Structures are given as C-alpha cells and as structure tokens.
Image: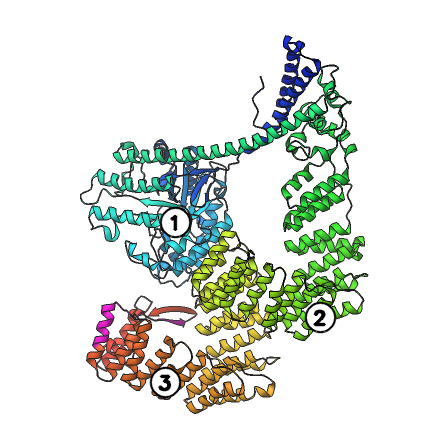
Amino acid sequence: SVPKVPHVHGPGLLDYVRQVLNTTLSSISTIQKSPSLRKQKPRDSHKMKLHLALGFLLAVLFNQNLLTVHVEAGDDFVRTRGVHFFLNGNPYFANGFNAYWLMYVASDPSQRPKVSTAFREAAAHGLTVARTWAFSDGGYRPLQYAPGSYNEQMFKGLDFVIAEARKYRIKLILSLANNYESFGGKKQYVNWARSQGQYLTSDDDFFRNPVVKGYYKNHVKTVLNRYNSFTGMHYKDDPTIMAWELMNEPRCTSDPSGRTIQAWIMEMASHVKSLDRNHLLEAGLEGFYGQSTPQKKRLNPSLDIGTDFIANNQIPGIDFATVHSYPDQCRLSSSSEQYQLSFLNNWLDAHIRDARIILRKPILLAEFGKSWKDPGFNTYQRDQLFNIVYNKIYWSAKTGGPASGGLFWQLLAGGMESFRDGYEIILSERSSTANVIAQQSHKLDQIRKIFTRRRNVQRWKRARAKRRGGWHGLWKRVYSLSDEWFVPPGDYGLGSVIGPSIPQTTLQALLGHACFATSSDRNMVSTIRAHNLRKLCTVPNIAFIGNKDILVSQTTSVNSFRKQHVPNAINMLELNSLLKNLVKTGDLHEARQMFDGMPQRDEISWTIIISGYVRAMKSSEALLLFSKMWVSPGLSMDPFCLSIALKACALEFNLNYGELLHGYLVKSGFINSVFAGSALLDMYAKFGKIELGIKVFDEMPIKSVVSWTAIITGLVHGGYYKKGLVYLSEMRKSGVEYDSYTLAIVLKACACLGALNFGREIHTHTVKRGFNDTSYVANSLSTMYNKCGKLDYGLRLFDKMNTRDVVSWTSIITTYVQMREDVNAIEAFTRMQEAGVSPNEFTFAAVIASCSGLVRISWGEQLHAHVLRIGLSDTLSVANSLMTMYSKCGQISSAAMVFHGMSRRDTISWSTIIAVYSQGGYGEEAFEHLSWMRKEGPKPTQFAFASVLSVCGNMAILEQGRQLHAHVLSIGLEQEEMIQSALVNMYSKCGCIKDAEKVFNEAENYNIVTWTAMINGYADHGYIHETINLFKMLSKVGLKPDSVTFIGLLTACSHAGLADLGFHYFNLMSSEYQIRPSKEHYGCMIDLLCRAGRLTEAEEMIKSMPFHRDDVVWSTLLRACRVQGNVDCGERAAEKLLEMDPNCAGTHITLANIYSARGKWREAADVRKMMRTKGVMKEPGWSWIKVKDRVSAFVAGERSYPEGEEIYGMLDLLASRVDISVQELGSLLDLED
C-alpha cells in the first residue's frame, strides 16, 4: 500500500516519493513472480510493468501538484469581501456581546476571574465577538491620566482581556474613545486642551480643534503599538482583535449638517489605516440618517446629532457599518410595546437594505437590548426583541445579505451587581434569553458550515476537473509514448527500462526526472542521458521549469547531481528564447517561475525578466531583480541592461538610484552608449530635471533619433514647448531624420503653444513621410487642430481615421470639454462606448470634467460608480477630476472623501482639495491641508498658496495672510502671476489697500490678472477715480481688459452712484472690446440702478436679461425696495424669490420689514404668521472677533462666552440711560435683519 501523502514540501515529500518508488518496484517484482504474468508474453509483461511504474510516478507528481490547490493560507484576521466578513477564506458571522467593563475589571488582578468567567460562558453559548472599551481618560482608575501619559496597570488589564479572548477564540472590537462623559470621553480631551490655553466653547470642539485631535491621534498610536505582556504581540499584529472603533456613538449636535463629523472620521480613518492595515475599522455610529439622505431622516428616533449613516460609512477606510437600537429609549420610551417593535423592524430593514444597495459593506448591529427597568417589563418582551433582531440577521446571512451579526448590550458575570444598568444578561442564570442567544449562535454556525462546505465542494470540483483533464490527457500521452518507444526486455530492473538504448524523448525525460526527484542513488539515474529541455517543457506540470517545487530538490545529493549533469546539456539560447516568449505573452508569473527554476542564468536571462517587469510597470520588482543581478558573481553589466534599469528608476520615481547608475555609466564609459545615454536623458526628463537632461544630451558623442526624441519629449512634457521646437530645428540641421514619434511629440508642443502655422508645416511632413495614417500621429494632428481652435479640421481628421482607438476618442472628448461644449463631450463618450472602445483613465477624467461644467451631479456619481467598478477610481487623473466635479456641484464632503481615499496624491491633488475647501468657504480646512501638504506632500504650488490667500481675504484674517506672503517670498514665488493677484486681492479685502498697491507696484511684469485684481480692490474701497485711471492705463501698457476687469469697473461705478458712467462702460464692453456681457455684468448694472433709486429700470433689466433670472438679482432688487420703501416692486421681487425658495427666511423678513416701514402692520404680521406656519426660522449669523490673539465666535443673544454677563449688564445700563430695553435697542440698531 502507498503511504499517506504528507502535507509538506521538501525532504519530507522526497522521503514519501522514495517510499512510493520502492513500493512500485516491489509491486513489479511481485507481478513478475505471479503465474499469470509468466503466461504472458515478455513484451506484454514488460509493458504492463512500465505502465504501473509510470502510473505510480505520475501519481506522485500530480498529487504534489494538486496538494497546492487545497492549501489556503490563513492569518486569522477577519476580512471583508463585498458585504460579508471572512475568516481564513470562510464566511464569518459575529454573534456577540458588549462588555465595556472588561479592561476596568481586569486591571485588578483579584477580579480577573470574572473576566475569564464571562468569556468562558460566552464561548459556551457560541458567542464569537466581544465589544469593549480601550479607553479610560482621566478620572478614577484611568488608562490615560494625562495626554500621552498612561497607567501601566490598566494597560495590563487590557493585555489580559485580549489574552483571555484569544484563549476562548473570541474576537474583540476595541473602541478608542467615548462620546459621553463616562470614562472621560470627549469632554476630558477638551478639558485637557483648555488647561493648555486653548479657548474651546463646546465639547464638540473635540472634532475640530487641532490640539485635541493630536491628543486623540497619539492615543490611537499608543494603543495600536502596545506590546501585550501576556501574548508577546503588538496589538496591531494580533488577530484576536477583529476591528478598531473610532469612538463610541460619536455625536456633534453643534453641527447638524454633519460636515464636522464627516471630516473627523475621514481624518481619523486615514490615521488608523496608516498605522494598521491588518485590522478592520468602524466608526462606532448609531445609524442616524443625515443630509445625504434627507428623505430617510424621518426614521431617526431623535433629532439630528451631526452624523450621517450613509456618508460616514462611505468614507474609505471604514470597512463595515454599525447600527445601534434601543426602542425603549429616546422619543420611543413612552410608546407602546408594539410600536417600539414596529420601529425596530423598519429601522433594521432600512439599514440592512442600505448596506446592501448603497454601501456595499457588511453591517453589524453593534448594540441592542431591552431594560428590565422599563414599566411593565417581562422576560418575554426582551426575548421577543432579541428574536426580531436575530431573525433579521439570520435571514440576511442565509440569503447572502450584509447583516453579519449582532452584539447585545451587555454581558455580565455573576457578582457584578454594581455594573447592572437594566440591560445586562448573565448567562449563568440560564434565562430564556440565554437560550435565544445560544440558538442564534447555533443557527449562524450552521450557515457558516453550509457556506464553507459549499465552497469546499466547489473547490474540490475545480480540482477534480483539473485533475481529470490533466491526468487523463497526460496518461493517454504517456501510454502512447510507451508503445511507440518500447524497449525489448533485458533485465527486469528499472535501470534496464530506462537504459541508454531508449531514444531521447519526453517519456525518457518524464521517467528520468521522476527518478531524479525521488532517489539519492546516483547509480539509478547515472544512465539517464541529458534530455532536451525544449521537449520536456511540452509536458504540462512535469517539466523541470514548470514544477520547481518537486524537481528542484533541497537535498545535497540531488543538488550535487544537478550541478554535475544538467548544466552541461543546457542550451541557454533555447532557454532564453522560451523565457522571452513567456515575457512577451505577458505571463510574468510563469516567466518568473521559469527564471527562478533555471539552473543557470546569463546576462540575457536577467535582462529579459527585468525588462518584462518594466514593461508591466512593476518597477520596484524590476529594481530588486537588477540589484540581485548586480551582486551575482560571473555577470557583467551592459548598456542595454543599464538602460532598462534607468527606465525602472523613472517609473519608480527613484531619483537616487538613477543618479547612482548615472555615476556608474560615467565610470564605466557606458555613458557614450546610445542606449544608456538616451535612457538616462529620458529619466531626467521624467523627473523634471530638464537642465541635467540637456547636459547629458549635449555631452553625448553620438545622437540618434532616439536621443533627439527623448530630449524633445522631456522639454515638451516639462512645459518648455518653444525650446522643444528649437531642438527639432537643430535635429533637422544635424542630418538626423525624425521619426513618427518625434513628429507626434512636436505636434503636442504646437497644440500647447497654439502654433497653428508650425503645426500645419509638421502636418505636411507627416504626409510626405507617410506618417499621417499612424494612429498616434493622427491623434496628435487632431488634437493640435482642436486646441488651435480649428475644431472642424480636427473633427475631419477624426472622421477620416481608419481606426479610432481610445486616444482618438479621448482627444476629441477633451477638446469638447476645453471648449465648454460639455453636452457634445457626453455624446462623444456615448458613441465611443457604442463603438466598442473601452475608456481609459484619461477618458474618464475628461468626461467627469464635462459633468462639472454641466453641474450634473447625478451623471458624475454614475461615472464615479463606474470607475469604482472597473478599478480606475484611484488613478490620479480620475480622482483629481472627481474632486473638481464634486466641488463644483457643491458636494464638498464627497470631494474630501475622494481625496482621503487616494492611495497616492500629486501636486494637483493637493492643490485641488485646498481650492475645494477655499471656494467652499471652509477656510480652516484649507489651512490644515496646506500645512499637511507642506509636511507630508509635495512642495506647495502657487495654485495652493493662491487658494489659501483667497481664504485669508474672504475671512479678513490679515495676520495669516502676511505669514503666507512671507513664505512665498522665501521660496521665490512672489513674481508669479497667480500669487501677485491673490496677494493684491487678500490685502484689499483685509482693508490694507496701501499694501495691495505695494504688491502691485513691485510686479516685474504687467499682466491682466494682477491689474484686474488691483482695479477690483480700488472698486471695493470706493476709490472711483483710481479705478478709472488704472483702467485707462491698460491700453498704454499693452494690456487688453477682460470680462473680470469690467466687473470691477462696474462695481466702482455702482458704489459711487455713477449710473450713466456705468452704462457707458457696460456698452463699451461689446462695442469696443467685443466682450459679451455675462450674468455677473448684468448683476452689477442692476445693483447700480438699485443704488441709484431707479427701481423700475432695474426691474425691466432683470426681465430683459438673456440669462436665467436667479435669486441674486431679485434679492438685490428686494433689498433696494426696502431702502426705497417701494412696496409694490418689493412684493413682486419677493414673489419671485419665494417661487424659487418658499422657505427662505431672508425673503420673509425683508418683506415684513418693507411692510413695517410703510406702516402696513397687518401685512407684516401675516408674513410673520406665514413663517411660523411653514416652520421657517432665521439661521443666526456668526461673528468672529479677535481679542488679544484669541479668535472667538458668537451669535446674537449668546451668553456662553467669557464676560458675557458683564457685556449684557453694560447694555442694560446703556439702555436704562435712555429708558429702553435691550431688545428695543437691538431693534433700533436693526440687529434682527
């Protein structure tokens, strides 16, 4: 009988193979001695023995091959795949409990048996997950008694909890902070910050204040990096921990919009994932719906708490969703039992459905329960609630849904009366609820087993199909070969069967390798002649190269045999040819297996495999192989291999490695090689080191077309378009004929410069040389004409293309977007898909940009879903375009979510998110990201600085603006056009018009952007004469005003009340400068007429303007009507505004004030009554004041800030002097509006 196959590789398997071989030989001897065999003809007898030997040997090889099919590595970490949890490749369901007290109790060694008892009883009832606190901040027996200072005894308690959970095979969810005051919570963090001089007005500043967030991040880092004194593992490496929880039930009631919590979760999820990629992460949410799904907010059991179940759980890094449910709490506490259960059903159904359809993540019911303190409580009610929850989870799990478990609140051990809160479950009391819990564990375990069994069956079927297909096909082949090359019997020993008289065939190779792998007896294999490896490789899974685990033995004897007998027969030319073919087909895995299994490798072998990795864009692996080649004895470097390594450096953005290779090229003299020199030039060009690239190029003794094309490409990609054209001219003078690649890159330079005539000349050359039909040249031609404004030419070339690839379509779509023909861009994208051409990342980036232009958020979201599905969402161009699209559609949180979900970010990414926050009014976030960019990202660009400078201007924070000004001076960006205009704008809005003038006068080069910023600055300050004089000087310095310049000019006329002069400039726009007035220009004119009291003309202009009449122009008219006391016109303006927004508080209040001013008290009262009926409330305005380097924010009527009572006391005193109340004083000052 054949011994049982061991589940190991290496020597253990070789021992097994030897045993099989001995068994085979014994069987053959037995068969030889049997009477039935003696009656057979010698040839048939020998043939049967040969088949038996082959059968056993092939079985060994195939068993080893198939063993790897069934082995699946498991690291014991819970993972997510789609809407399910998985553990070691099998479905995982979390039936568990909450026990917040575990660390607290375990910190006292005398109380640790209670922890052990709880885990033991939980495991006995089939519970698999426990959720507990990994925090205790300040107060009694703290874990963290001050920021960054920890109580080791408490930490040892948590160590013990994790070790005990591991012992009972229970996974842990560890929460890292608390929303509530118990165990410190966010209040403790805020108090710590206050003690350090931070002025914080609310506990919700936990989510906003950088100091507090720093404390929290440090706590997270400390916990994750904690070394467990019991298990000898760091927490972040321990699979006993299933997941981290950012906070227990985070809430931010001061910001019901949800933006604060959303930003905090984004930041902290990114922080946790940067420290620990092993564990899952969840936010600790209760499941309240927010602004992203307003129609579902009616399901919430209480008011807005600042969280958003959908948006918060869509944040990258949040691996699964959570929901909490206590129907006997909140607004439901006074409801009937039936109503509470009905709410529970609807609550769970909605969240499970959203997890499946919208989130596509698992969902865990992380807290639920019913208190025995409820009036009329009985155990049946609790069991009924548990059954509803468990049945929802069971049916979802059974049907492949996302509900993956539930954790009841809370589990206690016996003798813990002080921890009873009404919701506790003590399993040892053997209540009916304990039976419900155990039954749920059993049902989920059965589902797990069914799914696991189903996966195993499918795996077995696949393996059987592979085994049948491979076995029968190979056996049939071996059987026919043995008939074809049958050798007449001599001695019936195996040595004669495979003796030297057998031809050099695949059969010989098969038998020879089987013996080679199974025997240490050289005499047995010494008669095997070197075989042809090319024929050997035609046998699947048996060849030396194809199955190195068997045939490359680890034993000394076999290795010594291989060294003595194999290399002499190796044909390196054929081996390298085979390796090259594998690399060409793109099968790098097989190519690497062959390469690693080759007994001998030369320079060509190394170069082939390294070039394969470079071609597959796996540059890090390519450089690793090159480093191994560098230190391999007997190998020498050549220019071609070095050129490939330089390409890898360019792909990997590894400039240091590239510079080392540059030094070696100089030292070895390979710098004069065309291959190496061109690759070095290309590398420096891709790094933006144009000067170094030019130096390398100039020192090259021989410049080929590749070298010239490389330098021109580097210049064009670096933005040096004119210089690129100069080098093209030099190339032509040197007598080197340019190829199609050279012309294609030169056409790009023409497109970027708008050099239509030069582009046409290049077009002529492409026709003469026959390059115009080449796809990339045709694409470049079409793009060049499109960018030069000749869209008809570009479309004509596009239509004439024989084949339109993805580059062709992307070019035409991009052109439409740049020309703001967004509808045509969408249509072209649709036609592209109909033509069967798959879009790439640049296509999606362009078409997403078209959604930005159309402000079509629904289209943009569909495209976002599409790129997520095909795996392009993380590419830089797509992610940057998505951020821009979301910001232009007003979805700032979605743009931030894209940014924080990016695995890598470039300068555009950082600049875009800073601009998103700046333009969206989130100045604080813009500053934070600029600081983050300076610390961790690339060098900030002028675009990033200009965005934050605009924030300084809009928020009138002069000090920060001056600091930014100093910084741009230190890095030499002060003369950049964008920076100059941003500085002028910032100083103007901060009231420092003289500083703005100074920046303007120090500009070395005149440009219309800075000039316009100065005109707008004068206009905002009411300097009408300076504005007009500066405008008149434009033509003298050779500048032409644009549409923005006229906005400033018209604003100045409006502020000065110069209506006739304003009309003069309004007409001058189109008559002299051919600028078509935009909506903004009409807005300026309407404001001008309103300020001049010409309300009838203003209303007529609104009605006649060739644009959509939005709320801005009607609001301008309404405010003017209030000033002028025009009731009729005000009523018409208010009617239009209320049609657009029936719940606008400002419109109602302004109309009521118009009525009040004219003595129409009844009408004013009707408006106020209508506001109350609609539930319209005026949102209080916030004000900021800086006193002694401290910025404070407040609203009207607030008394919570320091000295608040004293301020109101002073107001009362002032009011008493004139015999009026504070409220009347506010009315006189018109504070209400």
Question: Which type of secondary structure does the marked residue at label 2 adopt?
Answer: helix
Asked if labels 1 and 3 touch by Cβ distance under 8 angstroms, the answer is no
Residue that carries the numbered disc 1 in the rendered image: 355
Question: Which type of secondary structure does the marked residue at label 3 adopt?
Answer: helix
Kindly give the residue lying farthest to the bottom in the view shown.
1060
Q: With respect to residue 370, does 468 lie above or below? A: above
Which of disc 1 and disc 3 is earlier in sequence? Answer: 1
Q: With respect to residue 36, does 119 lie above or below? A: below
The answer to whether residue 526 is seen in the rendering is yes
Residue 1181: in magenta span: yes
Residue that carries the numbered disc 3 in the rendered image: 1100
Residue 764 badge: 2
Across and down, in percent, residue 741 comes to: 70, 62
In the image, what residue occupies the spot 28% across and 39% down?
387
Q: Quadrant of the N terminus?
A: top right
Please, what is the three-letter code of the amino acid marked with disc 1? Ala
